[in-house]
Amino acid sequence: KLTPRLLMIANLVKNGSIVADVGTDHGYIPVYLIKNNLAKKVIATDVNKGPIETAQKNIKAYALEAYIETRLGNGLEPIKPYEVDTVIIAGMGGLLIRDILAEHLDVTKSVNRFILQPMVAQDELRKWLVFNNFKIIDERLVCEDHRIYEIIVVEHGKQKIDDDIYFEVGEKLIENKDPLLESFINKHIKKQKDIMNNLMGQETERAVRKLEECKEKIKKLEEVLKWVK
Ligand code: SAM
């Protein structure tokens, strides 16, 4: 049985897809996708040998070797253009996810759907995606072990972002009225307040500027919170 985070990721795969799970680690997502008839075929990749061996063990335990192939390699390097229509990259930093997508554009261009779950730098990843002709078509929040994870689904296409705040709080989360959105925004507000507390008493130009930025961000986050309620 998958954890809530992995389950949410797996359920965003379109029925009948051919999927690459980049950085598969344990291989739980590929096993779930095939066992539940959600994907036709999965290529499970990882840059490290240990995780590939763990994934192979799990795939063998369910006798799914005919449907799940494992490949060792960095990012999208083990995938050939047009081999898969969906790519999952989960449990890595947003900047690493960005680099993986940017490094093999021939493969990236041939994929229809990306399901991304950045652990950090979510805003930087959204910004890069939007400025590089990806369109965020869906977003979900999921709570696991008292932490809220962000899952971003993208396809190729143009998108206009009206305010920088949407790089932090995905517009789709607001549109979907995500059940965790209120706690998610409150966490963001708390983070800004913590930064402000740490800056208190400092009078350098940088600290003063940062304080202003935090205040502005809190104002915007509180506005978003008002629409959500
Ligand atoms: N995707 C799984 C999940 O969400 O539960 C595993 C996440 S685990 C924290 C990160 C995995 O990504 C590790 O198994 C690691 O070896 C792999 N990894 C890190 N950098 C990678 C890269 N550049 N290419 C492929 N795999 C990578």
Image (tube, helix red, strand yellow):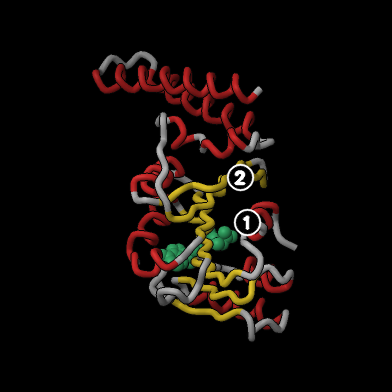
Residue drawn at point x = 41 percent, y = 29 percent = 163
Amino acid on which disc 2 is placed: Arg
* Position of 36 relative to 182 (above/below): below
Helix, strand or loop for disc 2: strand
Is the C-beta separation of discs 2 and 1 under 8 Å?
A: yes
The answer to whether 77 appears left or right of 22 in the picture is left
Whether the residue carrying mark 1 lies under 8 Å from ligand 1 is answered with: no
* Position of 115 relative to 171 (above/below): below
Whether the residue carrying mark 2 lies under 8 Å from ligand 1 is answered with: no
Determine which quarter of the picture holds residue 27.
Answer: bottom right
Quadrant of the rendering where the C terminus is positioned: top right
At which x and y percent is residue 88? 53, 62
At which x and y percent is residue 203? 28, 14
How far separated are the C-alphas under marks 2 and 1? 9 Å
Helix, strand or loop for disc 1: loop
Find residue 12 and name its label: 1
Mark closer to the chain start, 2 or 1 = 1
List the single residue furthest toward the front.
158
* Position of 76 relative to 151 (above/below): below
The answer to whether 212 appears left or right of 43 in the picture is left
Which residue occupies the foreground of this view, 219 or 91?
Answer: 219
The answer to whether 14 appears left or right of 131 in the picture is right
Residue drawn at point x = 61 percent, y = 45 percent = 140
* Position of 193 relative to 73 (above/below): above
Determine which quarter of the picture holds residue 213.
Answer: top left
Residue drawn at point x = 60 percent, y = 19 percent = 226
Find residue 182 and name its label: none
Find residue 140 and name its label: 2
Amino acid on which disc 1 is placed: Leu
Disc 1: CA contacts within 10 A as few (<14), some (14-19) or many (>=20): some
